[in-house]
Amino acid sequence: MNVEEEVGRLKEEIKRLGKIQDDGSYKVTFGVLFNDDKCANIFEALVGTLRAAKKRKVLTYDGELLLQGVHDNVEIVLKPTPGAAATEAVAKN
């Protein structure tokens, strides 16, 4: 799997595990991602994939390097795709 594929899979997993926000973004904590069995099987280097996604401005989180235990409560925010907030608003109504 190349980096782009891994970032795409990461987006899917954040949507699966996270909670959608009013703006169409998704939030999940690092601990939830790190401790999920499916994520552990998909990502050889979760932290590296997170850094690659952050560099590509796909998601945001505080800090540079996330470590298990120490950073379990750090929120990872998957940025909304253009039009996602409008689509979600329609879906809610």
Image (spheres, helix red, strand yellow):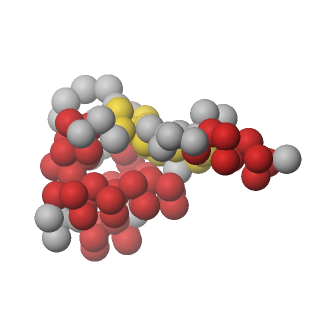
- Residue drawn at x 27%, y 70% as measured from the top left: 42
Q: Which residue, as the protein is rendered here, is positioned at the far right?
A: 93
Res. 43 visible in picture? yes
Image height check: is 82 above or below 13? above
Q: Which residue is the extreme one toward the front?
A: 83
Q: Please state the horizontal and vertical placement of residue 59, each as a whole percent of the image.
A: 36, 38
Residue pictured at 21% horizontal, 58% vertical: 4
- In the picture provided, is 45 more to the left or to the right than 70? left
Q: Position of residue 70 (x, y in %)?
A: 28, 36
- Residue beneath the point at 38% across and 48% down: 31
Q: Image quadrant of residue 73?
A: top left
Q: Report whether 89 appears left or right of 83.
A: right
- Residue 74 location, quadrant: top left
Quadrant including the N terminus:
bottom left
- The picture places residue 60, in percent across and down from the top left corner, at 35, 33
Q: Residue at x 74, y 42 (%)?
A: 89
